[in-house]
Amino acid sequence: MSADPELRLQHALEVAHRYLSHRDRTVAEMRRQLESRRVEPETIEQCLAMLLDQKYLDDARYAQLFAEDRRRLDGWGTERIERRLIHYGVPRAEIAGALEALGPADELAAALEVLRSRLQAPPADDRERERALGLLVRRGYELEVAYDAVRAFGRD
C-alpha cells in the first residue's frame, strides 16, 4: 500500500464502510476483514478507533440486537445465542449484558412457542417427550428450561 498514512487510513475506512454496508459487524469481525485485506496493524487500530468513536461499531448494541432477533425470529435459546456471539468475537461482558436483558421468563415463553410451532400436540409418551426435549436443546435451551417448557406445553 501507499507510504502515506492518510491514504492508508482512507483505504482502510473504505474497506470498512463497504463491509458495514451489508450488516452490522463486531470489532473482531472488522479487524479480521481489515487484516485479510492486508491493512497494516497500526492503520487497523486507527480505523477501528474512528469507527468506534463514530458508533459504526458497537459490540454491546450488536450483541443486544443479535440476541433479540435470534430469540424472536429463530427461537434460539441463550446457550446457542452465546455460542454464536462468542464465534463473532463479542466480549463476554457484552454477551452477558445482552442475555441478561432477554430474561428467564422470555426464554420459557420462547421455548413454548418453538414447541407450539413444531409439534401438533403435546408429547403423549416418553419417546415424544425426548424428541421435544431434543428439539429445544438443539435450539440452545438449557435442559431445565426445556423440561419446564415440555411440562407447560403438556398442560396447555
Image: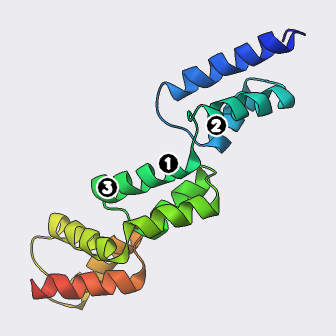
Q: Nearer the viewer, residue 133 or 58?
A: 58
Q: Label 3 neighbourhood size at 10 Å, few (<14), some (14-19), many (20+)?
A: few
At a point 77% along the width and 29% down the height, the residue shown is 46
Which residue is identified by label 3?
A: 74
Quadrant where the N terminus sits is: top right
Q: Secondary structure at mark 1?
A: helix
Inter-mark Cα distance, 1 to 3: 19 Å
Left or right? Give the position of 23 relative to 151. Answer: right
Tag 1 or tag 2, which sits nearer the N-term? 2
**Given the image, on which type of amino acid does mark 1 rest?**
Arg
**Given the image, on which type of amino acid does mark 3 rest?**
Asp
Q: Is residue 108 above or below residue 23?
A: below
Q: Which mark is residue 52?
A: 2
At a point 42% along the width and 49% down the height, the residue shown is 65
Left or right? Give the position of 116 relative to 103. Answer: left
In the image, farthest residue toward the front: 53
At a point 72% along the width and 34% down the height, the residue shown is 49
In the image, farthest residue toward the right: 3
Q: Decide if residue 123 is in sight here.
A: no
Which residue is identified by label 1?
A: 61
